Every structure is written in structure tokens, then in C-alpha cells.
Image (cartoon, grey):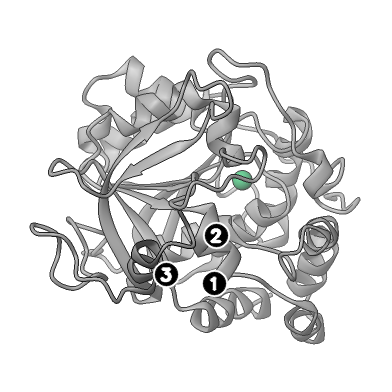
Amino acid sequence: MSDSPLFQALISGSLPARPGAPAQPSARRSGGPRPRSGRIPLVVDTDTAADDCFALLAAALHERADLKAVTIVAGNVGFAQQTENALLTLELAGRDGDVPVHVGAARPLVADWVSATDVHGEDGVGGQRRTGTTEVDSEHAVDALLRLSRAYAGELVIVAIGPLTNIALAVRRDEEFASRVREIVVMGGSINGRGNITPAAEYNIYVDPEAAAIVVGAGFPSLRFVPWDPTTIRDTVFDAGRIAEIEALGTRLSAFFVQANKATFAFDSAAGIGGSTHPDSLSVLVALDPSLVEVERPYRVGVELRGELTRGATVFDWRSDAPNATAIERVHGKAFFRALTAILTSR
Ligand SMILES: [Ca+2]
């Protein structure tokens, strides 16, 4: 499908949007973050390893972000290690003890946990360890999500960059939860049918497809997907030249980035991608800066739960008259690189 003229026209933006879709592909479907106070109340739900860390740096340090909490979900690497990685990242950002870390679901709803240590290394941070002793908050991640959705009703933005277990549990705990969230940006799925953990499924959705199915059916006022393919592996690849640019920044955060990114860079390069990919940090930055988005279209998203070969695949129905989400199909890659390097330059 990805080689078809129709699909190529669609992803290149040369195809007119279908009737009823926004006239401009990059037009926002609904009320995105337009912060009244200039800063967006934000929660990042994360399986913290590698690019999750850089996403947390952006959330902790970007001038438009008011990071209220980090919530941890089962995913990339060992659960306790992910929590350590989040605390390490906040320490490096100078935000440990300031931004609470809440531990959430330590396994998917139904499926067995599947790690991504082959991609990100055993610990996901290249052996780096924190020096501080800040502890996690005693409140469960799902309770924190529900509380913050009430405290910032109509304003809260959630960026979900791991499997969707915590978000689905919040949806099931409180039927009004989704309606109180201004926007949720989900890193997951692919709009061209190409997965990364299986031929058909992207990792975050594959690990907990039942949770993903709950989230796409929850009625969030604005649900935006940052897909793996093609967006991430076309627009956010950092090749060796870009990694060298980051290393040359000479900051503590740039050194952290280079070390934490090494395993992913090696894996993705061996997979023929041409460098490391940064879907999680992209997800945070598009939530904060709409100008990074070049093409975004409405879809009705479904999740395959039973397919013999396709469990965990996302189906982006481009023909539906009842979209439940948008997909960010193309971003300004150079501007994204500049935005992330600005974060890495700041400390
Ligand atoms: Ca992640």
C-alpha cells in the first residue's frame, strides 16, 4: 500500500483532503493547546528509556510547558529501571523533587509484557545513574491522572509515549476523565501498515492493544497520533552528522543525550533507518509547538486485537465520516531538530 500513488499523494500532502476534512492539511481539528497563561499544564506518561528521556527533558525545560507530573507505565525496559530513568532525567533537568514521578501499571491489561531492550539496551540510558535520592510520589499514576484532569479540567494536555495501560485505566476508572482532558498526543501506530516490533504492529500499541482500543474509543476531545511510519522514520532521524552536532554542544544534557542514545542509534542504523529516531520527543514538542506540524489529517483509528498476523496493528480509516483522532503525517524535521537541540543547550 505504501507504494501506491494514492498513498504517496496522501502522505506528500498533494491529495486534497476528503470532504469534511480541514481545508488545510495542517489545520487543527479541534481546540489544541492555546495556553491562556502562556504555559500548558502537561503530564507525560512514559516507559522511560532513550527517547522518552529526551521527551521528558523537553517537557521539563520548554518555556511553554508546565510539567505537572510524570507517570510511568510498563514498556521499554524493566519497570524499576524506567522509574530510575525518569528520576535521573528530571535530576539532570534540575526538576527532581519539583516534578513528581508517579508509578503506574507494571504490566499490560491483558497481554504479557514485551520489552524493547534489544532496541534501547538493558537500562535504556547507556549506564548513566543519578546521584540524588528523590523518591517517587506515593500516589498511583492513575490517581494522579484523574486528580490533574479535575484540577486542570479543559486545560490538561497528556503526552502518552509508552503503551496506553495507564490512560486506559484512567478512562475505565472515571467515565468523565476523557472529556476533561484538553488534548492527548499518543506516540503509536503507523498509518501505512508497517510496524516495528512485528511487520504490522508498532511497539507501544502492540504491548497493550486492549488499552489502545479503550483509548481510541474513549471520546477524547482531541486525540492526536504521532505514528511510527512514515512520520517518525522519515522526519525525525538523527544521522551521525546530527549526533556529532549534538555532542559538540558540550553541555551536560548533550553528553547525556549522546550516551543514552547510543544503543538506539546502533539498532536503528542496523535496521536501515539511517540514524536514531525520536518519536517521543517529537510527541512532546508537537504538543507544545503546533508550528512543527506540516500535515495532520483526521482518521477513525481502530486497533486490531485478534489478527493472526496483525495483533496490535492500528487501522487508520481515511474514509470515515466519524473521525476519532488525527494523525500527524509530516513534520518540519529541521525545526524539530533545532527545538530539541535548544533544550539540550539549556543546561
Ligand atoms: Ca516510549
Q: Which residue is rendered at x = 40% and y = 32% of the image? A: 145
Q: Position of residue 272 (x, y in %)?
A: 76, 64
Rendering coords of residue 155 (x, y %):
25, 49
Which residue matches tag 3?
330
Q: Are marks 1 and 3 in contact (CB under 8 Å)?
A: yes
Report helix, strand or loop for mark 1: helix
Q: Is residue 137 above or below residue 308?
A: below
Q: Quadrant of ligand 1?
A: top right
- Please name the amino acid that badge 2 sits on: Ala
Total marks drawn? Answer: 3
- In the displayed structure, does residue 122 sit left or right of residue 73? right
Label 1: which residue?
Answer: 235
Q: Residue at x 85, y 46 (%)?
A: 121
Q: Secondary structure at mark 3?
A: strand
Could you classify mark 3 by the number of other residues whose Cα lies within 10 Å: few (under 14), some (14-19), or many (20 or more)? Answer: many
89 relative position to 146: left or right? right
Taking the image as shown, residue 100 lies to the left or right of residue 250, namely left
